[in-house]
Structure formats: structure tokens, C-alpha cells
Amino acid sequence: MSAQSTVIAGVGMHPWGKWGRPFVQYGVHAARAALADAGIPWTDVDLVVGGETVRNGYAGYVAGSTFAQALGWNGARIATSYAACATGAQAIDTARARILAGMSEVALVVGADTTPKGFLAPNAGERWEDPDWLRFRLLGMTNPAYFAMYARRRMDLYGATQEDFAQVKVKNSRHGLSNPYARYRKEVGVEDVLSSAVVSDPLHLLDICATSDGAAAVVLVSEAYAQRLGLTNPVRVAAVSTVTPTFPNTVLDMPMLSTDAGTPGDRTFKQSIGAAAYEEAGIGPEDVDVAEVYDLSTALELDWMEDLGLCKEGEAESLLRGGETTLGGRIPVNPSGGLACFGEAVPAQALAQVCELTWQLRGQAEGRQVEGARVGITANQGLFGHGSSVIVTR
Amino acid sequence: MTVTTGTPAIEGWFTVGDAPTLLGERCIGCATTYFPPTAAAAGFCRNPGCDSETFEQVPLSRRGTVWSYTDAQYQPPPPYQAPEPFVPFALAAVELPEGMVVVGQVAQGYGTSDLRVGQEVELVVEPEHASEQRIYRWKPVVELGEEADQ
């Protein structure tokens, strides 16, 4: 506990899937689950922060009020966050800031999404100044094409193989087998991955995460409220990193068509996301027991391990091959099953990472428990310079 | 045969002709070069230490080295304009001597098996997959003598 800490009093999720219902239903389900988990009545919530998505029509643009109204107006303050895939972390950061400023005692953070099928594509209309539109219009450059470029570099620079990437999927599919919130709970073999269609060389269909419906919620409270509630030894938020890149950003980032020109700084953008979280928490990578990282593709999980300093550059495959990132290994990565088992529900996903780490640190991750976990870190990155890393401790 | 004339798919990003180049923008204040040339449109320099709002157009190097590459084996969604039937195509991110990486499609007739990280490529301009408009592309540079092996 430090002057900067806030307490996670409760977490809740709606199972991921392709349910085809309005996202509000999932969000309310997750919110009620988190409040029940915390033992806190809705009427005590004085701040609702909603993670929004740009695809959900009118109400989705003002997610804070959408969830607050669905739960029944209680006069709480509201905020809405949008930071693409990093939305959940930014929403937690908003809640945390108001709590630390003494302006809130009980904050409910909710993210939910209903996703369309297939490739994530830009909204309709012509936008010749928008790189996210231009990359499709001029180049046909999809999200998997970016993931594939990162994967290819691992192969050409570090000797990674398509089988290594497949092994990430195999590991995560096993991790997610008993996770009641995971969409895909089925063991996948290396051959299954390698025999699935190639989407963007070198990545196969089963290397790339799907898009899903889902919702996650976190109830964040002040230390004083936690004491009054009688919470003993709770999980705390030790750091939230929502940093932007520094100029020049010399590593290609989705959805850009180019990088900045110039001499790279000490850290890449992705490296700086974790570094800022470690600095804030006053710990280092060696203190981490468990990590939930954004495996939009199998190979991207390996990138994140290095970006978080869990191993040196070019060494992630060797940890994977040695079983060190599997449950029971030195540093289990994605014990939830990760995006491989969930599919991405954008505004909920960074919150889902925090839910999983909370269960892990409480010892409640049945069937996928990292024994003795006390420190967990999440990592994720949203389009257009949104860093996302949360460190939780107990 | 490489067609080098025709209307560019986007105005002001590249020249057409025998030796086409990408058109960057160089900041008058700090000499940082940008591509795509949207800095002037936005009206400011992205260097945090520079408040210049004036840019000059500069042609970028025609050759660079492959930072990474892939292909599209599934048809990308609109606004990509796909030919009927869809034909897979390769993509490359290329590091230029100016210090930036620029993504582009790979020239007709070349696929991922023709590419590797660090390889030299050259800018060409070709018709789009489903239109007569022109788009810049990256073409592997094949040294004399290598061609016979391919």
C-alpha cells in the first residue's frame, strides 16, 4: 500500500462469445457481478466510468451514462473513455485519479462490446486524411498484416518458427480450458494451427484472435472506503500506465503507413509502456509473478514478453520452448487463455485483463491458478498512441 | 512492363514517370522529414521541440531496405478496392535512408518468397489492383547475375 494505491473491491465479467445482443446487457451483467463480488450496493457508487466503442451507435458513444442509466440513475458522476484497445486502462486511470484526488470513494468501471464479424474495418465514408482509412483504401493493409510483419521480424531476426507461434496458441488454449468466461475452451494442437489457412504470411487463421462480444467491470474504491468495508489484504492497483510514444516513434505502429524519421530513443513505445508502470509501482520485471498481455496474434505475445522485460530481446521463444510461460513455469503468461481463447471485445479487454489478475492474486483462478502470485502486470496498446499497462499487487 | 503514367490514387504522395519518388515534407525549422505528406496539411511539426509550421516538399530516396513483409491472402474489406476474383498480394515495410519506415504493396509478380528482412527494394509506380489509377509499390532489387537463378 502506498499513497498512490487504490483498492480493487470487486471484479466481474460477462462470458465472451458471439451473442448478438446489445452491449449494454453485457455491461450491466458484468457491473452487477463486480458489485456483488465487492459486496457493495449500486447506490454506494459515486462514479461510473464507461469504456466506449465507436461501433455501437449512439448510446455507445456515451458509455458512462448508458451503463449508469441501465443500472438505474443514482446521481453518480460519470465519465466515458475511448482509447481503442487501451480503453479499459484509461477508464481505470480516470477512476483512480478521482479516488486519489479525494473526489470519489467508489468507482464502477465498465467496458462492453458487441462486435461485427470478420476483419475489423473502418467506418463507411471517404476520409483522405485518416491513416486508418487510407491504409485500407491505398494498401489493403489489414490488422493481421501488421501482426504478420512483427511476426516475420521475429523469424528473420531471431530464428523464430511458425511452430513457435503455434505453440503460443497451444499453451493459451490449455490455459483457457477451465476459464468460464472464455469463448473458446478447446485444446488446440500445433498441427491444427499449421493446417489452418494462412491469413497473412507467416500467420495462420489460428494465430490471430477473433472479435467477440463481452464485458468486464472493476469496482475501484479508496483505501478509507476499503477499511470501512472491512476488506483485509485486498488486491490493489499499484500502477496504471497510459503513456503516449515519444518522438520520434521509429517502430511501425498500426494503423500508420510510416514511422517518424530520426534517431530512436532509449526505449520503443511498447517498452516505455511497461517501464512507466514499473516505475510508478516501484518494482521491476523480476518481481512479476504473472502477466496478461495482448496476444492479438500468437507472435505478439512473444514481443510483449520482451517489451515488458520478462526476458531479453530475442529470447521469448526460448522461454516458451522451455515451458516457462506455461502454468507451473517461472513466469506464466496469459493464464486466462488470453485473446486466443477470448477474442477481442475492444472496450472490455483491458478490464478483463485486470479481472483475471485480481482472481489470480486472490487465489480464485480455479483450474488456471498461478500458485502464490502476488504481483501481476497487464500490457496492451491502443491505436493512435494509447499505452496500457496496469500493475496489481497483493 | 511497368506502366509509369496515369493518375495517382492519391494526390501529392508520389511522382509518376521513369524514376518515381515518394514526396515527403521537410520541416523548415528542424529539418525532420515526414511521409505521408500530411504535416503541412495539419499545419504543424510533430517534433515536440519544434514549433515551425512551414514545410518544403522533398523527394525521398527511391531505394531502401525491407524492415518486414507479409501478404494479404484473404480479401481486405472496403475501402480496399479488390479485383474480381481477388488475387493475393504482398506488402512490405521499407526503411529509407531518411530514417523512416514506409509501408507499401509489393510490385506485381513478386511475393513473400522473393523477400527477406534487410533486402534492398526500389520504388515503382503501377496501376492499382482494381483501377487504372496509379499507386507506389516496392520492387525487389535484383543484382546482375542473380536474375538467372530466379
Image (cartoon, grey):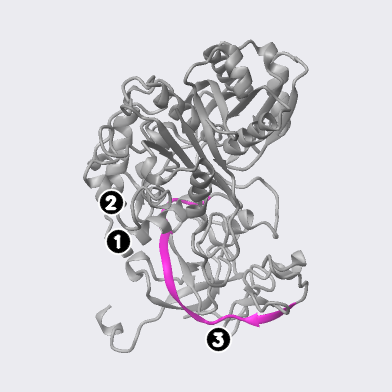
**Residue B19 disc label:** 3
Magenta stretch: helix, strand or loop mostly: strand
Visible residue check, residue A163: no
Residue at image x 41%, y 55%?
A: A148
Question: In the image, what residue type sits under mark 2?
Answer: Glu
Q: What's the distance in space between the residues labelled 3 and 1, CA to CA?
A: 35 Å
| Secondary element at tag 3 | loop
| Residue A134 located left or right of residue B95 | right
Q: Residues within 10 Å of mark 1 (few under 14, many from 20)?
A: some
Q: Chain of mark 2?
A: A
Magenta stretch holds residue A216: no
Question: In the image, what residue type sits under mark 3?
Answer: Ala
The magenta segment: B55-76
**Residue A158 disc label:** 1
Quarter of the rendering containing residue B92: bottom left
Q: Are marks 1 and 2 in contact (CB under 8 Å)?
A: yes
